[in-house]
Image: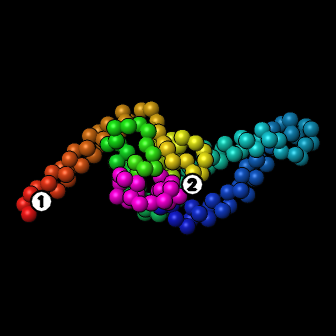
Amino acid sequence: MLGAGFASFMGKAPAFLMRLAGALHFADPAALVDDCWTISAETMDRAALLMRECVIRHAAVFYDEIASGGGVSEETRAIAGWVLTQDSDRLSSRDFTRGPRCCRGLSLFDLRRKLSVLEAGGWLLPETDSPVNAKWSLPLGLRQAFAAQEAAERANRERMLTLIRQTAEAR
């Protein structure tokens, strides 16, 4: 979870968006020549795109690293491992809430908070920008880039399953 630090950052996001839009506006030479003090819709769209695609994603990674002591949290690692072992490149909230233990039984809001780090890192692509998005896809090349980790994760899961079965049979 990203915690209070990220929540505080997001509380300041509207003001940051306006400052970013102002910077983009005054960086445009046409705005200086025309002595125009009105920020155009196009400039606001560019600022919103930068916020969504860059600033918020990097802030999510930053605050996750702080919350996990400088590394990737165990929950994020568990979810990423589970994602790699799935046969489908499209996953839904239902898949997640039935998959990794740390996601079971979560509301969509809480699930999205947990997945925000993987979204920010480019592991999961939301189907829509809606706050109630419940479907994600894996980016092209993710499985190839992490083929060794996928194989290790599958082997580890098989080893754990074997141990569970042996324990059950021994009873």
For badge 1, the amino acid type reads Thr
Residue of label 2: 59
For badge 2, the amino acid type reads Ala
Residue occupying the point 92% across, 42% down = 35
Q: Magenta part mainly helix, strand or loop?
A: helix
Query: Can you tell which mark lies on residue 154?
Result: none
Q: Are marks 1 and 2 in contact (CB under 8 Å)?
A: no
Residue of label 1: 167
Residue occupying the far right of the picture: 35
Q: Which residues are magenta?
A: 97-115
Vertical placement of 91 versus 117: above or below?
Answer: above
Residue occupying the point 49% across, 44% down = 135
Q: Is residue 171 visible?
A: yes
- From the top left corner, tell me how far across and down residue 53 is, in percent: 60, 44
SS of the residue at dot 2? helix
Q: Nearer the viewer, mark 1 or mark 2?
A: 1
